[in-house]
Image (cartoon, rainbow, N blue to C red):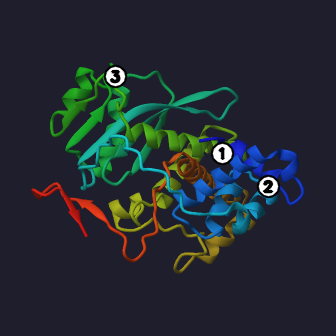
Amino acid sequence: MALSVAECCAAVSDVGASSEESLGQGQVSKVKNNLRKLHNNLGHPSTRSPKKLLKNANASETALCFFGRADRIELRHLTAACQTTLPAVPNHFHDFNHRIGWDVKTLPGWKLNQKAKCLNIVDFASSYQVVLPFYERERSELIKQLYLKGWQQWAGVPVEVLVDPAQTNTAESVCAQLEIASRVVTTAAEAHNQLGKVEKHGHLFETVLVKMLDQVPPKNQEEYEQCIIQTMNAKNDLLNNKGMSPCQRVFGRNPRVPPNLVQESPCPVAATSPLHDANAARAYDIRTQARIALAQSQDDISLKTALAARPRAERDFLAGDYVHTGDLRSTKKVKEW
């Protein structure tokens, strides 16, 4: 990638009808190439979706106008050759609570330079996530109690539990409790795919929480735990995969929020309570900022992924062209149409 997301947005923000000459042809060409790559890797969407991504990436109005001018960026199909994709492990689990993984995640606290530890539990099939904060020294008995009360009490016993080889996870008290009805899978130490899905969702949770704490700084431990709960609820409600959120995969529907005016049969009392009660207004702000932070984080990830992805190889075929295809299942590996 020629420019990063921030450099691309900063460079495009300075490009106008009269400033292309001052930037130089080389820099303008790099900006156009990055925007063209973004447009292609997003699947040639309308100008509305990329504008939303650039807006959440703090691009200026000039950048948004520049992207909307299709004649200036000259959006065309890229014809670069396809590269070999990186090896990936497909998800073989389709039932909720078949395999879960956990690790201890360090998150920013409610005080300056404070760190708080949380037990991060993720289901591999539905991506349902539970984050349980604790303020004691990390011990195997504490991890076991958090798992029993925070997951097994309501979700039941999983078939497999994936953990890293930390001493608190491999202690006899934890393994004895898990091996009663579950199979414990321990990842290799320092492996490149050590916890994969669990660490990825933990990083997204931290990104959303940091954005949220900047907007609504908690005043005490109670409000901090409320921020964690609302961040967890927003992620499980709004993070859709194949048209379904984690809550819909687990419970069959998203939880009902009484003050939400866009759902069916909203509650007028709950919707107007923030206007008269300071505590209700604070809780409403925390819930709203959690959902806004999740949307901004998702747009930022989509923008970076689209700019870093390999270009799509596309070609316009005309009538009369010869097309050669390969079929490994047949004895004749090359067929001519």
Residue 279 horizontal side relative to residue 226, left or right: right
Q: Which mark is residue 168?
A: 3
For the residue pair 70 and 187, the one nearer the viewer reads as 70
How far from the left and from the top, in percent, is residue 43? Answer: 51, 63
Q: Quadrant of residue 147?
A: top left
State yes or no: discs 3 and 2 in contact (Cβ < 8 Å): no
| Residue bearing mark 2 | 60
Q: What's the distance in space between the residues labelled 1 and 2, CA to CA?
A: 13 Å
In terms of sequence position, does the residue under pointer 3 or pointer 2 come before the other? 2
In terms of sequence position, does the residue under pointer 3 or pointer 1 come before the other? 1
Q: Which mark is residue 5?
A: 1
Work out whether residue 279 can be spotted.
no
Mark 2 Cα-neighbour bin, 10 Å: few <14, some 14–19, many ≥20: some
Residue 225 horizontal side relative to residue 331, left or right: right
For the residue pair 113 and 314, the one nearer the viewer reads as 314
Q: Quadrant of residue 324?
A: bottom left
Q: Check the image and report above or below for 140 versus 197.
A: above
